[in-house]
DNA sequence: GTCCCTCTGTACAACGATGTACAACCTCCG
DNA sequence: CGGAGGTTGTACATCGTTGTACAGAGGGAC
């Protein structure tokens, strides 16, 4: 009785009984151990198929100490930049036979801390974290020993491997571009009230450096603070900037979503982009290639970021305690309609 | 020596030795068992802190048969609809103390099959799958017994719990709206060559039913097929529709991304939306509330879909073999600028 | 003082897989 | 025919945790 498949409850033991061999022999077949007679192997394989056996990954992990699962901790999945990044990480991890578990921190310090503290027990082999709220100090205090790779922030002498973006240089390039096309009243959207937000701080510095270099004024009322980096925040910030006595003729947004919100808000007020107002974003998300107008933006190399992060983890798993590595991912400036550029490749490249 | 934290390698055994109690007592403390003296508890807790102990989730899972991890299998994370859905699922799961592992199927039958077959071993307690390529037949053949919830497709008499969307009714509503505002040459973008794509098939049927009801022509050349549901596909399809001898004055796109691509393409051709061409999408992704013009769209209740899916799984984990349940999630039609509606709440609601 | 009961804590087995040690068997060679 | 050497398969311990069974300590009622 019960010769059929009792679901995926079958364990090595059941398969072994059915094939009339020992548990270890089944294990050997499953793992492709060489010295198993063809006939034994066939008998075992048949039992496996009949019982629909699947190895229990928890048991395997307990025994071997590895799960081949890594965690990717991101602020928000529905920020397109992070969704696109997640996709790249998943793809790179897959090539290594790893599964990716995604943790959403919502950019909250508390939840980033939980992830760092090893909330996942030893379920994961490694962690890729994109910290928003935590700074170098908190990272230094970390006691958990799960291999860690940091994304995005520039943490000097950090305790972990780190894929950085040169925020200052890129922000300077974005601002310099607005200077180059003749704008003189250049605003910024994306400064943050929290002191710990290093990203915002560095981008703001790059913006200020570029203005200084060009000999242009840097008025405080042209720097708009936001709570989050969503479209709504960009739109609200744009609204405030338009109320300033001498409104800007260009705006550098610290990410594309805010830039898209700003575009929409400008449109609502009858302001033409790029004629009356030039807009530059950051992230090069797909949305910006199809918006009206298309969006000029800082384009970080997301695939490179993902692949380097995964490679860092892979290296850590082999040799534990080398000094931390750091790579700075390249960026380009994609000039599109919102700052006077051409319509650009994206919509055109989509052929039938 | 070595009184410090030897990383997260500490196990119950180490803690027990250090606190001078048995392993089980430490386990009791960790799990909040009541009958432990305050002094013992304190001693154990101190050892836990000193050693920075974290329970090994693999061992716990092996012992208890539950991992409190569920998998969410989606076509693509960087399709905003799925990113938003994933976020909701993660949130609902978190309230139950579950972690969500995301599997990207890329809409490939092969990978959907792998997920169904239990590629995750018994690492996960349940699976939420949004099938694109697989139909009812393949789902019937499933042998794995991990609790399963299906999203989106209408699989009649399916073998699993199912959160459905009434694709036909919603497509009819979208098309009827275009009829209501006086359009007569109504096109559709999103039909699929593959026969197994039930979603596309059902939405197409709703579109055709609405046209028939209104006594309007349903010309084959007004139905554009696409491979994928990205912006580029929508743009390419729009381009083809504009080349038809008698081009449409309205277009119903089977998702928002294609609608956004179509919007952009129309703009490139100097066609005004909604004056010359009305556009309706599907999904109500955030992008469509900020695009120019804002996008009229079918708005499925994503939060409801996510919460019902998670509740279905929760119920399955308690009582295994009840007959499958099915819930049809509600939808609304959000009328915005792309079909002559007002600017709508979204940008306005974003206050400073 | 005895009995019983509750409170604390211990010892052991088990979850499913795999590494180690070794036993049984075969083949080949002298 | 005996022994060396390789092949094929088995038994057992182990990973870290928790459920079960039970032992000893302490308190109250008679």
Image: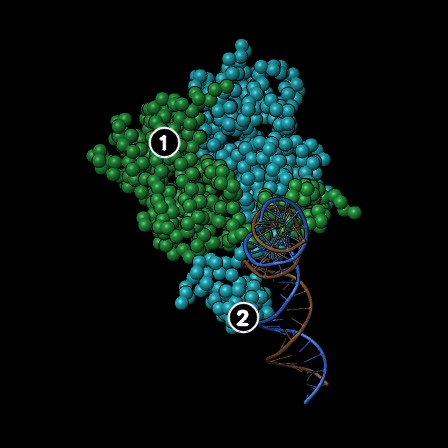
Chain colours: A green, B cyan, C blue, D brown
Residue B52 lies left or right of residue A207; in this view the side is: right
Residue highlighted by disc 1: A297
Q: How many marks?
A: 2
Disc 1: CA contacts within 10 A as few (<14), some (14-19) or many (>=20): many
Residue at 44%, 16% (x, y): give it.
B269
Query: Mark 1, mark 2: which one is toward the viewer?
Result: 2
Name the outermost residue toward the top.
B245
Quarter of the image for the N terminus of chain B: give it.
bottom left
Quarter of the image for the C terminus of chain B: give it.
top left
Relative depth, front residue between A249 and B194: B194
Residue at 39%, 25% (x, y): give it.
A293
Name the element at disc 1: strand
- Chain ID at mark 2: B
Image marks 1 and 2: residues in contact by CB distance under 8 Å: no
Residue B324 lies left or right of residue A270; in this view the side is: right
A49, above or below B292, in the image? below
The picture places residue A335, in percent across and down from the top left corner, at 34, 27
Relative depth, front residue between B133 and A134: B133
The picture places residue A305, in percent across and down from the top left corner, at 40, 38
- Chain ID at mark 1: A
Name the outermost residue toward the left.
A215
Name the outermost residue toward the right.
A1
Residue B1 lies left or right of residue B189; in this view the side is: left
The picture places residue B144, in percent across and down from the top left corner, at 66, 42
Disc 2: CA contacts within 10 A as few (<14), some (14-19) or many (>=20): some
Residue A181 visible somewhere in the drawing: yes
Residue A269 visible somewhere in the drawing: no
Residue at 68%, 42% (x, y): give it.
A39
Name the element at disc 2: loop
Residue highlighted by disc 2: B21
B284, above or below B123, in the image? above
């Amino acid at each position: 009785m019960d010769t059929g498949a009792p679901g995926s409850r079958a364990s090595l033991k059941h398969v072994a009984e059915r094939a009339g061999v020992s548990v270890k022999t089944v294990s050997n077949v499953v793992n492709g151990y060489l010295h198993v007679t063809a006939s034994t192997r066939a008998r075992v394989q048949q039992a496996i198929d009949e019982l629909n056996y699947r190895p229990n990954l928890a048991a395997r992990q307990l025994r071997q100490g590895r799960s081949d699962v890594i965690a990717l901790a991101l602020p928000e999945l529905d920020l397109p930049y992070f969704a696109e990044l997640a996709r790249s990480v998943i793809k790179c991890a897959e090539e290594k036979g790893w599964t990716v578990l995604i943790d959403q921190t919502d950019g909250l310090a508390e939840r980033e801390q939980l992830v760092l503290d090893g909330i996942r027990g030893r379920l994961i082999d490694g962690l890729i974290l994109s910290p928003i709220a935590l700074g170098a100090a908190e990272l230094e205090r970390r006691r958990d020993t799960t291999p860690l790779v940091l994304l995005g922030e520039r943490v000097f002498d950090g305790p972990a491997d780190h894929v950085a973006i040169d925020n200052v240089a890129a922000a300077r390039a974005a601002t310099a571009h607005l200077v180059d096309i003749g704008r003189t009243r250049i605003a910024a959207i994306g400064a943050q009230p929290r002191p710990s937000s290093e990203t915002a701080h560095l981008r703001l510095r790059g913006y200020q450096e570029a203005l200084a270099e060009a000999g242009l004024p840097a008025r405080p009322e042209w720097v708009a603070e936001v709570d989050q980096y969503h479209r709504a925040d960009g739109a609200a910030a744009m609204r405030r900037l338009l109320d300033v006595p001498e409104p800007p003729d260009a705006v550098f947004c610290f990410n594309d979503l805010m830039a898209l919100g700003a575009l929409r808000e400008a449109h609502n007020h009858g302001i033409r982009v790029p004629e009356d107002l030039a807009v530059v974003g950051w992230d090069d998300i797909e949305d910006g290639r199809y918006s009206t107008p298309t969006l000029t933006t800082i384009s970080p190399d997301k695939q490179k970021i993902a692949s380097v992060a995964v490679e860092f983890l892979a290296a850590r798993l082999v040799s534990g305690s080398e000094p931390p590595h750091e790579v700075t991912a390249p960026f380009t400036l994609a000039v599109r309609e919102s700052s006077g550029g051409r319509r650009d490749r994206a919509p055109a490249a989509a052929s039938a």
